[in-house]
Image: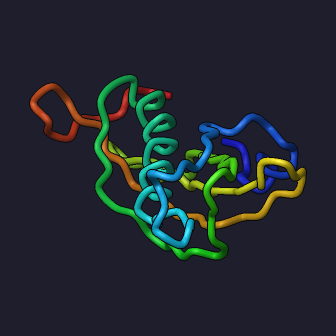
Amino acid sequence: MRDLAMLTQSKEIPTIRVIAMPADANPAGDIFGGWLMGQMDLAASTIATRRAHGRTATVAVDGMSFLAPVAVGDEVSLYAVLTGEGRSSMKIRVEAWRRARAAEETEKVTEAVFTFVAIGEDRKARSLPPS
């Protein structure tokens, strides 16, 4: 497992990169926190599904606080890394960074730890396969 700080400092390719669009914003042009959380959940689920070799479900989100707003047109990069696992569960830390479309500087906007559980076809928890 790689350290998240190393991922962001090394400018490694993010798990997801997306442009914030007008449909994702309030009347003032700020992106809804729920949209951003949804993007973070998608990034975390990418890591969880690959580790579980199959279906997973989000069961908890811890420690989310919004540090800076995201505006329409900003590029949002989401970095996700597996930080721990149990018999069927996985903890994935996700950081979201914004960059104005015409700028080079990036700014961290939020982070959180997502907990996922591997599930079977019956939608019940199943053990993770060996890593």
Is residue 32 rendered to the left or right of residue 118? right
Judge by depth and name the residue closer to the eye, 29 or 104: 29
The percent coordinates of residue 52 (x first, y second) are 39, 30
Residue drawn at (61%, 67%) of the image: 110
Q: Which image quadrant: the N terminus?
A: top right
Is residue 129 rendered to the left or right of residue 10? left
Judge by depth and name the residue closer to the eye, 99 or 56: 99
The percent coordinates of residue 33 (x first, y second) are 47, 66
Query: Which quadrant of the view contains residue 34?
Result: bottom left
Residue drawn at (63%, 63%) of the image: 70
Judge by depth and name the residue closer to the eye, 68 or 57: 68
Query: Which quadrant of the view contains residue 13?
Result: top right
The percent coordinates of residue 121 (x first, y second) are 15, 25
Name the residue at the left extreme.
122
Vertical comparison of 35 with 63: above or below: above
Residue drawn at (44%, 69%) of the image: 62
Name the residue at the front extreme.
27
Query: Which quadrant of the view contains residue 57?
Result: top left
Vertical comparison of 93 with 30: above or below: above
The percent coordinates of residue 77 (x first, y second) are 67, 47
Residue drawn at (47%, 27%) of the image: 50
